[in-house]
Each structure stands twice: as C-alpha cells, then as structure tokens.
Image (cartoon, rainbow, N blue to C red):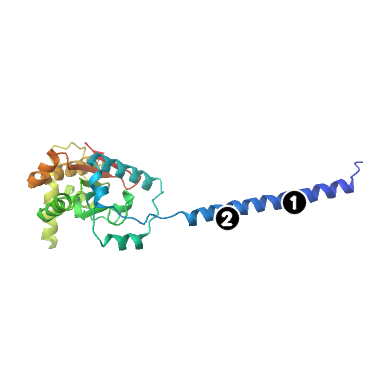
Amino acid sequence: MIKINTKSTLFIIASLAILGTSCKDKTAQDAEVLAENTITKKPIRSVLTAEEQADMSPDEIIGRLKKGNENFVANNLTTRDHSEQRRLSIIGQYPQALVLSCVDSRVPVEDVFDLGIGDVFVARVAGNIENKDIVGSMEFASAVAGSKVVIVMGHSACGAVKHAIDGTDAAAMGMNSLQSLLDEIKPAMENIAGDNRTSKDSKFLYDVIAKNVYNTVVDVRTQSPTMQRLEKEGKLKIVGAFYDMETGKVSFLK
C-alpha cells in the first residue's frame, strides 16, 4: 500500500497553480507587447518628392518594384497613412513608374508592387494593349512628369487574351469596339506553337500572353520617338512583365 504525504501533495498542487498563473500572465504580457508594437508601428506618411524621383535610376526603380512585389507575395505590405499622403500629394506628383495593366479586377497594381499614393501612374485596358491615348499617357508620365520606368504587365488567366485565342465573335453580338480590341491581341498568336491552340492549353495561353506583352512594348517604342530617345539616353526603361494571380509574383520578361 502506497502512503501519500498530504503536506507534500498540497505543496505540489499549489506550485503547479502558481506556475500555471505565471505562464498565463507571461502569455498575456507577450500579447500586450505584440499589440503595443503593432499599434505604435508608424505608417509611412510621406510621398515621393522631385528630388527623390530625380535621384533614382531606372534600374533602381525596377529593383524597388521587385522588393515591393516580394512584400506583396509575403503578405507584408507597408503600412501607410493614406490621409496624410493624400494631403501631401496635392502639392505635386513625382511617380517613379507607369504600369500598363489589364482592366482585370484581380490585378491590384499598387498592392502588387506595395506602392502608395503618388508612387506610380496606372493605365488600364483589357489585354494591356496600347493605343494613341495610352502612348500619350506614357509620354506624359515619362517626358513631362519624370517617371523613369514604363511596365507593360500581362497576367495569368487573362480573359481578353482567352477570347482572342478562341475566336469569340464579339461583332456578332453587337460589340464592335470589343471586337477591335480582340483583333489587336490576335497577332500575338502568330508563330506560337501549341497542341490544340486554344485557351485551355495552359502553355499556349501563357506564351500568347507573353508575346502580347512583347508586341505592346515594341509598339510603344515604335509609336513614340520621344520615349525611344529617352531610352537611348538611359533616362527611361520600357519593360514587359507577367503577373501570376495564383502566387502574386511578378516576373519581368526579357
């Protein structure tokens, strides 16, 4: 028969209770510290200045955009005081880049590159194709407002490219303007190999999206002697990119 020492048992129980309370207190303290640190983390209030824009090279800007995309992929976006940034931006704007993106609502350009108010110009059109108004906007951004990078960014599962590949007859449905847009994308299918050459062929779809981006970059250069000159002088870079909606990653295309 095992004898139980009552005093010893009571001492052990009391000790465990104290230890449990201490652990709970420590956990609560850690939570309070974490919450305090989160609250006291100061958001960015400033906006880009003319001096900061002038000091950055095109390559440095691209590097910053890549780092911003890494933050987006890691779900670690910079905290910003949008009210203060909005107020400060009234004085003027000095964006570092212009991004031509598709209209797709699943491509939040500023978030994708972890950017705030006044950081970037954004132009949108289905299929991220160019036209005179878009090129004119790019000239304003670069030659007038001082932006040093122009990005043409396509994305995965692009609906406009899918319809162009599959030969959707928008004109027959009374959408002549949409038909004109799809016709602008179709040249990207030329000389692209594919097993069945439909939008269901994922590799073929990616290749056409990438070729469409490439075509747009070439067309932008062709249509704007001013931007060609800025590129030759090293003051501007016009580049293509691809946004993967599943991973959130942006790949810059060669």
Mark 1, other Cα within 10 Å: few <14 / some 14–19 / many ≥20: few
- State the image coordinates of residue 158 (x, y, percent, origin top left): 24, 50
- State the image coordinates of residue 55 (x, y, percent, origin top left): 25, 44
Is 113 or 29 nearer to us in this picture?
Answer: 29
Q: Is residue 207 visible?
A: yes
- State the image coordinates of residue 24 (x, y, percent, origin top left): 66, 53
Mark positioned earlier in the residue sequence (2 or 1): 1
Position of 213 compared to 75: left or right?
left
Q: Amino acid at mark 2?
A: Glu
Q: Which quadrant of the figure contains the N terminus?
A: top right
- C-alpha gap between disc 2 and disc 1: 21 Å
- State the image coordinates of residue 245 (x, y, percent, origin top left): 32, 48
Number of numbered discs present? 2
Query: For the point 75% across and 51% down, which residue is it?
Result: 18
Query: For the point 10% across and 42% down, which residue is it?
Result: 229
Q: Amino acid at mark 1?
A: Ile
Q: Is residue 107 visible?
A: no
From the image, tell me which residue sits under label 2: 32
